[in-house]
Image (tube, rainbow, N blue to C red):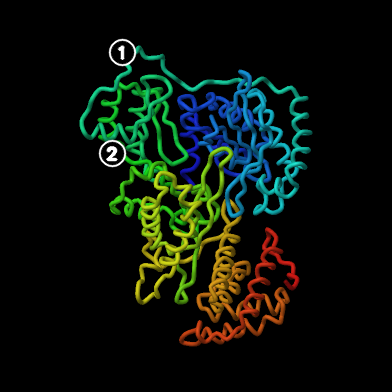
């Protein structure tokens, strides 16, 4: 947005009773609940009113806007944990004991370059205590979170650093303080609903073949007889302004008058009576919003990626579009894939929630033929369900251009296996090895002269580059770029590609000096000047680095490189140790010899 349009936009939002408070910054963020809370047949009770009350209480407190880092809270209506309570800073999962409703409380979770599953803080607390608990956790975070290093400032790093027992001790003291202050009782405001339908009005009328297909894919019964949720697929969450305005009229005329957003970047209408469905289908179809989509397409999620984010490495939205097209044209029965989730992030920061995707991809970069190529690290088996939440296992990386084909071949292998009904069983049995074998087939990018398209990201009209990437809202962009090179160095070392390992190791930390060399030889020479000559890296490694510079000028550097495996291993280890000594200001302490 142009700068001069921001104030008018904020005023327009205020006129519509909307606020950006909690949308960004070191604050309590948007507090989430299951999109079907209140109407889900599986829920213990409706948790949405607690999410609303917690939002209104915490965001009214000025302290909530001055935290060490963002503080994310989620409420889930059952152990299915659709809202991701087990991977949030604070998570509340509905329980009922002896007729009393309440929550299990989790703390210290989150996704990013260093993801962490939440730890169980309480087996059960009465629901009325949720706000006090959220406030107490916030106060512990405020007093003890790392305000110096934003890269380690999230609540999960505090829990990891001091341990759950020490955190619990701090938390219990703050909870006692909160209770002693006698906060106002929780005031719950339920979501809109509709009166129960008579039995003779609960049937769904017959419709056209198009209506029947849409009904089978996009309509879900609520726990209230005769009422339904209608899923509106929004590709990557996009809804043009004109369509949004027309959809608002439809929302006002049907159901409870509320449009609900989902964590899969789609929208849902609730409290739609069966008798309304045919008319609603026609209205949505006229806007192009009634495409019957199998869950695997609705569950395809991507962050903004490098299209707008300064931390983004790859154009993740472009890849999502390519994957969608490949799935549609692959000839597979997409309905048979069930609720499989595909999550894509443009970098390791996990805005696309790739660690919990059944198949997760995160943007990276590799050097091929002396040029940068967009790659994606692949993780398999992520999931969110209380007691079963886990992050996906990294099985390697593929060029961005090969990612759609890799995904389709992996899904075909799954469907051909003896575990076609259970993706997690497939992953836990042979799936990881099958995935690794497919990675091996797809991981190499050809040289530039053979296939130029591999050096262009999806939807890009210029060769792939990391120019312009750097510190952004998460203040972690530089760290992400370093991690890309260190991952390259490690993988190359393990594969016996010693020249490539040396090159990636020497390139990794040059960004901290504001240096972006275009040539291999320049990379080695700048490392000699800025790290070895400055005594930040063991001077004994000058020989192997100089050998890299010499071989970089040869017609075939990989074959010309004469550095020993032991020296290259030591170089990679030294660079990793130096990186780990770096503070948030990108200053170093000389690393000890490994």
Quickly name the residue at label 1: 200
Q: Which mark is residue 69?
A: none
In the image, taking residue 254 as reference, residue 38 lies left or right, namely right
Classify 87 as above or below 49: below
Residue at the far left: name it. 208
In the rendering, at what x and y percent does residue 369 appear? Answer: 45, 76
Q: Pick whichever, 475 or 301, lies toward us.
A: 301
Instruction: Please tell me which residue is depicted at 56% across the width and 46% down the height of the picture.
Output: 390
Which one is nearer the viewer's eye here, 126 or 187?
126
Viewer can see residue 304: no
Which residue is disc 2 drawn over?
288
Dividing the picture into quadrants, the one containing residue 85 is top right
x then y, percent, for residue 104: 63, 31
User: How far apart, in angstroms, are the residues tagged by discs 2 and 1?
Assistant: 32 Å
Q: Earlier in the sequence, mark 2 or mark 1?
A: 1
* Mark 1: secondary structure: helix
């Amino acid at each position: 947005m142009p700068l001069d349009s921001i104030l008018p936009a904020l005023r327009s939002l205020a006129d519509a009773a909307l606020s950006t408070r909690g949308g960004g910054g070191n604050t309590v963020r948007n507090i989430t609940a299951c999109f079907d809370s209140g109407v889900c047949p599986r829920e213990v009770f409706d948790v949405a009113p607690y999410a609303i009350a917690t939002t209104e209480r915490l965001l009214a407190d000025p302290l909530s806007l001055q935290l060490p880092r963002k503080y994310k809270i989620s409420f889930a209506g059952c152990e299915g944990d659709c809202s991701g309570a087990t991977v949030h800073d604070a998570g509340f999962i509905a329980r009922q004991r002896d007729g009393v409703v309440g929550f299990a409380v989790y703390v210290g979770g989150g996704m990013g370059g260093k993801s962490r599953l939440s730890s169980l803080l309480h087996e059960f607390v009465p629901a009325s205590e949720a706000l006090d608990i959220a406030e107490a956790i916030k106060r512990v975070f405020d007093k003890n979170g790392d305000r110096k290093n934003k890269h380690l400032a999230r609540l999960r790093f505090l829990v990891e650093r001091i341990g759950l027992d020490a955190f619990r001790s701090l938390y219990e003291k703050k909870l006692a303080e909160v209770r002693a202050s006698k906060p106002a009782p929780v005031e719950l405001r339920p979501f809109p609903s509709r009166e129960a339908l008579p039995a003779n009005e609960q049937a769904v009328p017959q419709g056209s073949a198009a209506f029947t297909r849409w009904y089978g894919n996009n309509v879900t019964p609520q726990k209230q007889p005769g009422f339904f949720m209608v899923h509106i697929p929004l590709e990557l969450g996009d809804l043009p302004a004109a369509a949004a305005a027309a959809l608002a009229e439809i929302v006002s005329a049907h159901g409870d008058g509320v449009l609900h957003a989902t964590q899969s970047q789609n929208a849902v209408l609730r409290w739609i009576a069966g008798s309304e469905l045919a008319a609603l289908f026609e209205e949505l179809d006229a806007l192009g919003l009634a495409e019957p989509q199998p869950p695997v397409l609705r569950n395809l999620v991507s962050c903004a990626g490098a299209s707008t984010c300064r931390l983004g490495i790859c154009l993740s939205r472009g890849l999502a579009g390519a994957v969608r097209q490949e799935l549609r044209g692959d000839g597979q029965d997409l309905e048979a894939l069930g609720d499989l989730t595909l999550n894509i992030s443009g970098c390791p920061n996990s805005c696309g929630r790739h660690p919990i995707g059944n198949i997760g991809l995160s943007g990276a970069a590799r050097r091929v033929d002396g040029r940068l190529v967009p790659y994606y690290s692949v993780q398999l088996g992520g999931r969110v369900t209380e007691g079963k939440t886990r992050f996906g296992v990294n099985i390697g990386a593929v060029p961005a251009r090969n990612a759609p084909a890799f995904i389709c071949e992996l899904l075909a292998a799954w469907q051909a296996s003896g575990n076609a009904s259970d993706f997690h069983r497939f992953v836990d049995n042979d799936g990881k090895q099958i995935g690794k074998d497919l990675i091996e087939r797809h991981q190499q990018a050809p040289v530039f002269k053979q296939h130029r398209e591999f050096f262009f990201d999806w939807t890009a009209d210029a060769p792939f580059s990391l120019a312009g990437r750097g510190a952004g809202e998460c203040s972690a962009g530089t760290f992400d770029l370093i991690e890309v090179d260190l991952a390259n160095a490690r993988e190359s070392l393990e594969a016996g590609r010693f020249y490539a390992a040396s090159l990636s190791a020497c390139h990794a930390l040059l960004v901290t000096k504001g240096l972006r060399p275009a040539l291999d030889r320049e990379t080695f020479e700048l490392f000699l000047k800025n790290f070895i000559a400055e005594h930040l890296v063991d001077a004994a490694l000058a020989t192997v680095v100089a050998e890299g510079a010499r071989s970089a000028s040869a017609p075939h550097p990989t074959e010309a490189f004469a550095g020993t495996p032991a020296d290259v291993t030591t170089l990679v280890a030294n660079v990793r140790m130096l990186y780990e000594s770096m503070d948030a200001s990108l200053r170093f302490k000389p690393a000890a010899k490994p």
